[in-house]
Amino acid sequence: MSGLAVEHLRVRLAELHQALRVAVAHQSAAAAVLTRPDLTPFCVTDEQVDTLLDRVDAFTEAMTEPPSAPRPDPESEQHLRRLAAARGVTLPLDALATRYGLSRVEQDALLLVAAPELDPGYERVYAYVVDNLNRRAPCVELLVTVVAEAPADRLAVRRLLGSSGRLRRYGLLRAYGEAPNEPARELALGGGVFEYLMGWGGDVGILGHDPGEVTHPERPVASPYLRSDRLIALGRALAAGDVDVVGLWGCSADSQPDAARALATAAGRPLRRVTADVAQDLRTAAALNAILWVPADRDFDEALVRSGVPLCLTGVNPWRPPGLLAARTYAELTIPAPDFPERREMWSSAFPVLDPDVLEDLAARYRMSGGDLRAVAAVADAGARLSGTGGPVAEHVEPAIATVTRGRTSGVVQSIIPRRTAEDLVLPEAQMSQIAEIASAFRAWPRIAESWGFACKSTTGGVKALFTGEPGTGKTMSAEVVTGMLGLELLKVDLAQVVSKWVGETEKNMEEVFRQAEESHAVLLFDEADALFGKRGEVKQGTDRYANLEVGYLLQRLEASDGLIILTSNLKENIDPAFTRRFHFVVHFPRPGLAERRRLWELAFPPEAPLDPEVDVEVLCRLDMTGAGIASAARTAALSAADSVSSSIGMRHVVRGVSRQFQREARLFRPAELGRYAGLLTDNGSAHA
């Protein structure tokens, strides 16, 4: 590859050598006319002034002529491209030009800057062309003189080499040093460009970067914002100059790029993002006739007030600098989150091959931004390619969603990937039906809320459920099962990390919890929620007032959430009535009855466990124990069997496990409850070995 790359540079430089000879000849002719050894060091003669005026007159007369047509590529260069294609590679200069959209003139300028790194002799030639031996480095004036001959071409090249041109915007060329004017600006190659052109390796994608560039994504996803008549009208007003600042508020951080792009599309202009150098951003946006996007999470700069460049401001909450609004023409739009039909259209554009029912289900369960959805599509495509089976992309959508959305957690929540299913859940039929109904309701709510208009009749979004019952009756497991039915992630709130004695910290931590759940499209579980959602009391001291404020904040945040939120509590009466009214489902978990305990004992021992056939489940299921208690007793029995080097888990080990569980629960275990196995229980609660 290096050989072809060097040969390509030789061919292109040979072309430029002809241009250099022409530039040298022009300079030589000019010097012959303008140089008078006897007078030049002391004054400018009348003849010299006339010659210079004739030259500038000719230049200004030809300034408006159309630029010259681009030169065709020589056959030798085409031959090199064919050789490279036969080897399955691309010539580095061609790859660089394709990646950054460089014209042939821009490529020539790049090669002229690279030439002194090949041979220092170029520096003296460059100094001769610009008639100054102190300016040996390639500069704007030199590049314009060599690659452009006609005045119109010179002006066009001068623009290409400016700070807003592609070469300098992407950092392929960098300006350095001080210069009295722009033509004298000296230029050097960006890092790694020379090595890449020589074919010595490198990544073309990282050779240049324009930090202010906002490109259109390669993967098309329908933009919900282009369905807004008001946004389209604002975009057209920007294009017409009727307004020059537009605020787009209410969209999340992930959605703001799509909203800004939609405004620029409606205006028919490119979009650029503000960076650290606001003044240069404004100059570049003006040069490219672009809209400058200013997210609300940055400091205000006075240059925005003085400029006339159209601006797009975005943020979750409005950000309206008074000085900017006073000096410019401002309009704004509060953008709601995409509704169910818009989300369905987004999913359909990302996965046109999916069944309509599947698309509806995905749109109901996930409120994804365009960026997240594009990531899901890319991961799903990669999964389909790597599977080796040539199966449809549809099989890889759910794993891709999990890859993109899960794991965005911190210390305040514990991520739980549901592994237990409805078959592992042992509840009375009424409670089982309610659990299934919660999952169905969450899938159906977006459709009836947004398509059927029920959102206007309800003050709360999403689905909220309260699980009450004694410890160990299956509340937490049921939350896991519901989450598994929906194919989502379960985020369990760590109350010890959330609740703080410092004023305002609890609310701050809770906001982080809700934000993580919304970003991860996860089910939120508040286990033993009494500590957070308990009853408000009478204000007797300052801390009572703040505690009541926390409850008030939680009420408001619970209503605002569009997700599935589950609270568990040992006693329903411990929860503030204001919360209870906002629950769509309240499920009470009773202690298991005889039939449920029988099933729980059957599920307590894995199929691989060496359970003695003599273990009498009929006797065990008559013991008043919860599901968690039975599972704990089974584990203790297995440990006891392993400790005694027994080949199987026998009845004596199970009795010991039950005895230990009763002790942990501070309950009296009477031998009579074991019937004919009472002899296995000793007075101190341990079983016979």
Image: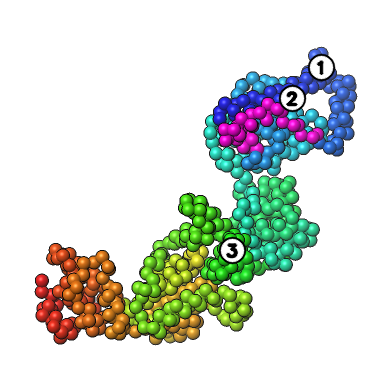
Lower position in the chain sequence, tag 2 or tag 1: 2
Q: From the top left corner, tell me how far across and down residue 585 is, in percent.
A: 46, 82
Q: From the top left corner, tell me how far across and down residue 483 is, in percent.
A: 44, 70
User: In the drawing, does residue 670 fall left or right of residue 199?
Assistant: left
Q: From the top left corner, tell me how far across and down residue 539 is, in percent.
A: 44, 83
User: In the drawing, does residue 152 fall left or right of residue 73?
Assistant: right
Closer to viewer: mark 2 or mark 1:
2
Lower position in the chain sequence, tag 3 or tag 2: 2
Depicted 595 relative to depicted 10: above or below:
below
Distance between mark 3 and mark 2 Cα atoms: 55 Å
Q: Label 3 amino acid?
A: Trp
Q: In the image, which disc is placed on residue 32?
A: 1
Residues in magenta, as a range? 68-97
Depicted 422 relative to depicted 259: above or below:
below
Tell me the residue that label 2 is attached to: 19
Closer to viewer: mark 1 or mark 3:
3
